[in-house]
Amino acid sequence: STSKRSHYQLRNVHIDDVLDSSLLPFLEQMKVQGVELKKELKKQTPSILADADELGQIFSNLFANALFEMQSGGLLSVSLESDNKEALITISDTGGGIPEEHLSNIFDPFFTTKERGTGFGLSVVLRIVKTYAGRINVESDADQGTTFQIWLPLA
C-alpha cells in the first residue's frame, strides 16, 4: 500500500526550530511593512513526529496572511508553550481582523476575501493540523486583529 504522504520525511522535529525557519523568509517583508515581531518560544520544547516542511506550511500560511493584513505596520506575536501532552502555538496579528460572517468559512477550500487569492492557504493549514491529530482555533476582532491557536499532540 502506498501512502500519499510517502514523500514526507517523518522525524522528531522541534516546533520552535520550525517556527524560526518559517519566519526567516518573512523578516525582510516585516521590516519593509514596519511590522514588529514578538516571539515567545519556550525552549526545550518536546519534539513531535512530523515532517518539518509540512509543519512549516502551517506557519508560513499564517505568517503570510498576517502580513497581508498589516500592510502599514503592526505586531506579529508568535508563542509556543507545551505541557506533557501537547504543544500550543499561538500566532496573532494586529491587522484588520476577519469579519464575523466569514469566520465559519475561512477553512473552506476556495474561500478567499483577497482579490488574487486562491483561498487554499487555510484549508491546507487545517488539513495538515488534522493530519497530525491537532486542533486549531481562530478568534478575530475587527479592530484588534486575528489570533490562531494550534494544539499539536506530542510524540
Image (spheres, rainbow, N blue to C red):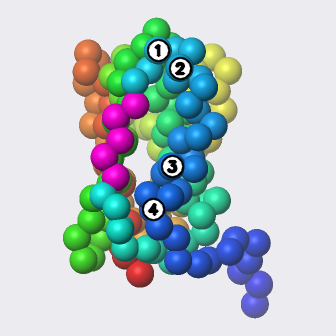
For marks 4 and 2, the one nearer the N-term is 4
Mark 2 sits on what residue?
31
What are the residue bounds of the magenta stretch? 37-41
Instruction: For mark 1, give the secondary structure.
Output: loop
Tell me the CA gap for discs 2 and 1.
5 Å
N-terminal-most mark, 3 or 2: 3
What residue is disc 4 on? Answer: 15
> Which quadrant would the C terminus be assigned to in this image?
bottom left
Instruction: Please tell me how crowded label 1 is: few (under 14), some (14-19), or many (20+) other residues with Cα within 10 Å.
Output: some
Query: In the visual, does 41 lie left or right of 12?
Result: left
Q: Is residue 78 above or below residue 11?
A: above
Q: Which residue is mark 1?
A: 34
In the figure, residue 135 lies in which quadrant?
bottom left
Q: Amino acid at mark 2?
A: Lys
Instruction: Give the labeled residue for mark 3.
Output: 20
SS assignment at label 4: helix
Asked if residue 102 can be seen in this view, the reply is no
Crowding at mark 2 (Cα within 10 Å: few <14, some 14-19, many 20+): few
Left/right of residue 31 with respect to residue 120 in the rendered view: left
The quadrant of the rendering that contains the N terminus is: bottom right
Query: What residue is at 35 percent from the left and 68 percent from the top?
Result: 44
